[in-house]
Image: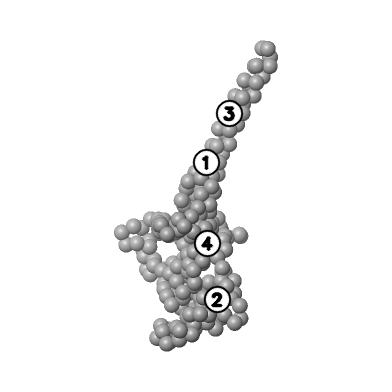
């Protein structure tokens, strides 16, 4: 899992960065040839002018995107009702009969512990499923990553929300990607020119 983080999230590093989460356990799963890219640069709480962090709800939301990708149960004990509401908004509403169980899991920890035995079987049946969300998350195959020059920058894969304004970072990344594509196309064009010239020369002098 690759998570792109915005600036000022760490006291010792003010620049944007990417967090790498390695999962050796996926070798024996259907996910073995895929990578989840998360762009969390727009998810943060402004602590002060120079510092940002994540709220519990934001951490719970991001963690559960990974759980959905892995096919695991949603767990909103960290993040509560706010994380649950965001998950439902982004990944679709569960069936009516499952909503009470999910809501129960979002209650304060003391009440959740008391009702865990009742909630757990229903939580296992929830139908929130992972899906690629433009501007947020994307599952890419190794072939797709190779096609992008093995770049592991989430912004290269998740894209942007339709109609949203590009940030300076997104614009620079998009411009770099277009420039790389142009360089590749120019190289192919030169190869074609050389091939055509060689073929013409062969025809004319035979």
Question: In this rendering, does residue 65 appear at all?
Answer: no
**Residue 7 rendering spot, x and y as whole percentages:** 40, 59
Q: Label for residue 180?
A: 1
Cα gap from disc 2 to disc 4, whole angstroms:
25 Å
Q: Quadrant of residue 47?
A: bottom left
Q: Tell me how far mark 4 sits from mark 1, CA to CA.
A: 23 Å
For marks 1 and 3, give the CA distance. 17 Å
In the rendered image, residue 172, in percent from the top left (x then y), is placed at 49, 49
Q: Quick one: label 3, few (<14), some, or many (20+) residues within 10 Å?
A: few
Give the position of the N terminus as an image quadrant. Answer: bottom left
**Sequence-earlier tag: 2 or 1:** 2
Q: Earlier in the sequence, mark 3 or mark 4?
A: 4
The quarter of the displayed image where residue 51 is located: bottom left
The residue singled out by tag 2 in the image is: 125
Q: Could you classify mark 1 by the number of other residues whose Cα lies within 10 Å: few (under 14), some (14-19), or many (20 or more)? A: some
Q: Nearer the viewer, mark 2 or mark 1?
A: 2
Q: Few, some or many C-alpha atoms within 10 Å of disc 4 (few <14, some 14-19, many ≥20)?
A: many
User: Considering depth in this image, is 29 or 20 the residue closer to the camera?
Assistant: 29
Q: Which comes sooner in the sequence, label 2 or label 3?
A: 2
Q: Disc 2 vs disc 4: Cβ atoms closer than 8 Å?
A: no
Q: Mark 4 or mark 2, which is nearer the start of the sequence?
A: 2
State the residue position of label 4. Answer: 136
Q: CA distance from mark 3 to mark 4?
A: 38 Å
| 12 shown above or below 102 | above
Local secondary structure at mark 3:
helix
Task: Give the Cα separation between the discs numbered 2 and 3.
Answer: 56 Å
Residue at image point 36% right, 58% down: 14
Tell me the residue that label 3 is attached to: 191
Camera-side residue of 203 and 124: 124
């Amino acid at each position: 899992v690759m998570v792109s983080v915005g600036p000022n999230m760490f006291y010792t590093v003010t620049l944007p960065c990417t967090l790498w989460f390695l999962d050796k356990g996926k070798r024996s799963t259907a996910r073995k040839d895929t990578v989840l890219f998360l762009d969390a640069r727009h998810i943060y709480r402004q602590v002060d002018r120079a510092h940002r962090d994540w709220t519990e709800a934001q951490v719970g939301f991001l963690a559960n995107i990974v759980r959905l990708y892995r096919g695991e149960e949603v767990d909103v004990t960290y993040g509560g009702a706010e994380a649950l509401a965001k998950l439902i908004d982004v990944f679709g509403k569960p069936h009516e009969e499952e909503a009470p169980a999910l809501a129960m899991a979002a209650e304060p920890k003391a009440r959740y512990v008391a009702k865990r035995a009742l909630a757990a079987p229903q939580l296992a049946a929830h139908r929130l499923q992972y899906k690629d969300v433009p501007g947020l998350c994307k599952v890419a195959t190794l072939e797709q990553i190779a096609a992008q020059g093995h770049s592991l920058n989430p912004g290269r894969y998740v894209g942007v929300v339709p109609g949203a304004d590009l940030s300076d970072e997104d614009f620079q990344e998009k411009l770099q990607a277009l420039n790389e594509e142009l360089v590749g196309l120019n190289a192919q064009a030169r190869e074609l020119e050389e091939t055509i010239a060689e073929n013409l020369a062969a025809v004319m002098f035979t």
